[in-house]
Image (cartoon, rainbow, N blue to C red):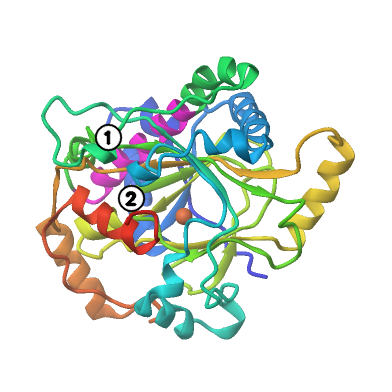
Amino acid sequence: MSSIALPIVSLDLFRAKSQDSPAVVAECKKAAEALIAYGALLVEDSRVSEDDNNNFLDLMEDYFAQPEAALKKDERPQLSYQVGVTLENTEKPKCAVDEPCLQVIARLDPAERPLDITGHQPDPKCRFFWKMGEVPPYETKFPSLNAPNVVPEDEDIRTRWVPTLEKWGNSMKTAVKGVAEMTAMGLGLPGGTFLDASRYGPHLLAPTASDLKKYGGKDTILAGFHTDLNFLTIHGRSRYPGLNIWARNTGKRIPVKFPPIGRYLLVQAGKQLEHISGGLIKAGYHEVVVNESTLEAIERRKETHPDRPLIRISSTFFYHLSSDYDLAPIALLAERARVLRGESIYPDYVIEQTDYPAIKVGQQVQNELRHIALMA
Ligand SMILES: [Fe+2]
């Protein structure tokens, strides 16, 4: 098992000093370099509250522990599941049907490969999408990506729902926006570059749930090897380990570990950031599996909380560019990407793409959703 530590960037430092102070400039550069080299980073933000995360995880465990009939009421297949619940075994790991992605796996050292996804089985995970975007003041070409939220019916869950999701969702949203700003500055762009492009993005608080009573066996794939289709993904601490990421600069599997104390969140680059940067930053591959550490956490949880549902919740927030934004590489970044490709300093397991054609963000999202079987 690998012991590579992810770079840590501090939002506290970023906020404490003026934007042109050498410490802030250096921290922004660190964020940008981390995303270029690793596709991921840990962000420290003292505004993030562990209690808010715990309240959120408790509520999600209660929600997903409901009978299937109750959950079914919150499904919106006609909206491509972009609001409400997605039940288990609906979403396919894109990579299982994607030739370039299978090549990525083949190019990894066998000892560093993800668990085998070639069985084409959909992921055994449920998910809830809670939209946290600002409604565009103009007529969007992509209304289904901008549909209203679903609130569950159950009395107890319903009363806690909006405040708990909004509180925790806003902590993650604020942090990921900070990282987007730092990254732009670290790349030599105006700080508002990515924030402006994502102003009306259909951002999603997107907890996923895996029933560990059913899917708690060693080496069960909870989410197969893939990259995310959005701009940046941010995760809070889960109660059960199992998230592995692959950094571009090593090609090694990295089990994500949060520092034991402090307010940390994990940020990973998605496809929209890869596209807008012309491949300078690559979307990060990851998987969620049941490994030894997951099993240990399950045993501990059974002892300490015997009455609680045994469900692994991942506390995830997807930050998106605006659906109507014209996605195309920023020239300065595309040029750096070209130079970087020429240097060939990274292991070649990531397939280098040179062409990122202009496309509306909403169209890019719909193309990706079709691929993972969420959209007809
Ligand atoms: Fe993901």
In the shown orientation, is residue 232 left or right of residue 59? left
Query: Magenta region's main secondary structure?
Result: helix
Give how far across and how far down residue 29 sits, in percent.
32, 49
Separation of disc 2 and disc 1 at Cα?
15 Å
The total number of labels drawn is 2
Give how far across and how far down residue 278 sits, in percent.
20, 63
Is 185 in the magenta?
yes
Image height of 116 relative to 273, above or below: below
Q: What stretch is highlighted in magenta?
A: 169-188
Where's the C terminus, which quadrant?
bottom left
- The answer to whether marks 2 and 1 mark residues whose Cβ atoms lie closer than 8 Å is no
Identity of the residue drawn at 28% across and 76% down: 352
Camera-nearest residue between 28 and 79:
79
Give how far across and how far down residue 170 sits, in percent.
43, 26
Where's the N terminus, which quadrant?
bottom right
Specify the farthest residue to the front.
69
Cβ of mark 2 under 8 Å from ligand 1: the answer is: no
Under tag 1, what secondary structure? helix
Identify the disc placed on residue 230.
2
Is residue 273 visible from the viewing direction of this image? Answer: yes
Q: Mark 2 packing: few (<14 Cα in 10 Å), some, or many (20+)?
A: many
Q: In the rendered structure, which disc, 2 or 1, sits on the residue that comes first in sequence?
A: 1
Identity of the residue drawn at 35% across and 35% down: 178
The disc labelled 2 sits on which kind of residue?
Asn
In the shown orientation, is residue 305 left or right of residue 211? right
**Of circles 2 and 1, which is in front?**
1
Is residue 246 visible from the viewing direction of this image? Answer: no
Q: Mark 1 packing: few (<14 Cα in 10 Å), some, or many (20+)?
A: many
The disc labelled 1 sits on which kind of residue?
Asn
Image height of 64 relative to 49, above or below: below
Q: Name the residue under label 1.
A: 146
Under tag 2, what secondary structure? loop
